[in-house]
Image (tube, grey):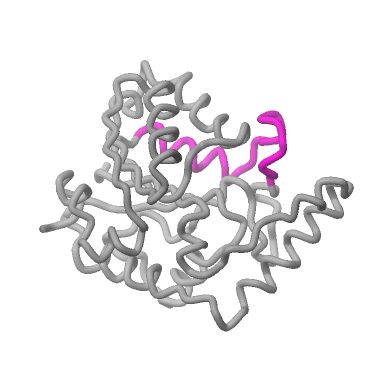
Amino acid sequence: MAPCVDWFFGRGLSIGCGLRWSVPEDWAMLDRPVLVNRIVEVIRHEMEQPHIDTTDIKEFLSFLARRTTVPWQHQFHTTNWDYLLQREISALKLCLQPRWCANTHVYHLNGTVENLDDNQHRSAIVLESDPASARTSTTESNTAFSKIIWNKTFVIVGMSFECEVDKFILHSLNKVQDDLPIGESHWILVNPDANALEASSQRIQGALPHAKVVKVASLFGDWLRSELPELQATCAVDA
């Protein structure tokens, strides 16, 4: 099996593209189905606004296509509800899966507002305020987890595993870390917020005590323009 880099994108990616909307605090009083419907409607609307700039995503995919070393590949996960990354991958209009890409599907671990003909295999939308028990088993989440636990190289962008549903991801990895490659994995954390960076580092190290964690205090776009030096060190991309 080819070595693989698993990318996890949190709100940092969306914010970098200009999608800064967050759920208003006064929406907390709404019934959950009404709240979810409003979130879906607003994010779909926000994604179409003229200020949304996905240049960083385009440059990121182009960089991976040009600089990924053989036999490395990449696969993508996100806790974002938007589908900006998936939309840019789809816009490439790939006839064949490229060598550098393990999967052209972006695994939306907290659900997505994307309107598909068939959503039955996708994860349902999970809210930051939800308890960990709200994360139900789906075809998408099971497939993503079964891939993640066998890999050893991870890049986390703008994500701190702060809410209970995201902590549950690390809890699930902790349960298998003694027996599978994930236990001795290498994590690169990218976040311009020093406090969030330190918090996510501690949470990952607590769940995976034998993992190596490298902290990069940077915006994703700036790190990309520096040519991902910490990832170069893993030999996944060339120098």
Give above or below for 189 relative to 112.
Answer: above
Tell me the quarter of the image containing the C terminus: bottom left
The quadrant where residue 24 appears:
bottom right
Residue 133: image quadrant is: top right
Q: Residue at x 44, y 28 (%)?
A: 203
> Is 49 colored magenta in this rendering?
no
How far across and down, in percent of the image, does residue 208 sit? 38, 23
Indicate whether 13 appears above or below 133. Answer: below
Give the farthest residue toward the left: 239
User: What percent of the width, then of the height, locates residue 148?
Assistant: 41, 38
Q: Position of residue 5 (x, y in %)?
A: 31, 47
Closer-to-camera residue (217/89): 217
Q: Position of residue 57 (x, y in %)?
A: 40, 68
Q: Which residues are magenta?
A: 126-150
Can you name the residue that lies furthest to the bottom here? Answer: 50
Using residue 89 as the reference point, say whether residue 21 is left or right of it: right
For the residue pair 104 and 15, the one nearer the viewer reads as 15
Quarter containing the N terminus: top left
Q: Is residue 173 above or below residue 231?
A: above
Number of marks in the image? 0
Query: Residue 178 appears in which quarter of the rendering?
Result: top left
Residue 128 counted in the magenta span: yes
Identity of the residue drawn at 87% across and 49% down: 30
> Given the current orientation, which residue lies at the most extreme top position?
178
Query: Which residue: 30% across, 62% down?
Result: 222
Left or right of 45 in this view: 157: left
Give the answer, above or below, for where 44 lies relative to 32. below
Along the viewing direction, whichever of 97 and 170 lies nearer the viewer: 170
Residue at 61% across / 46% down in the picture? Answer: 110
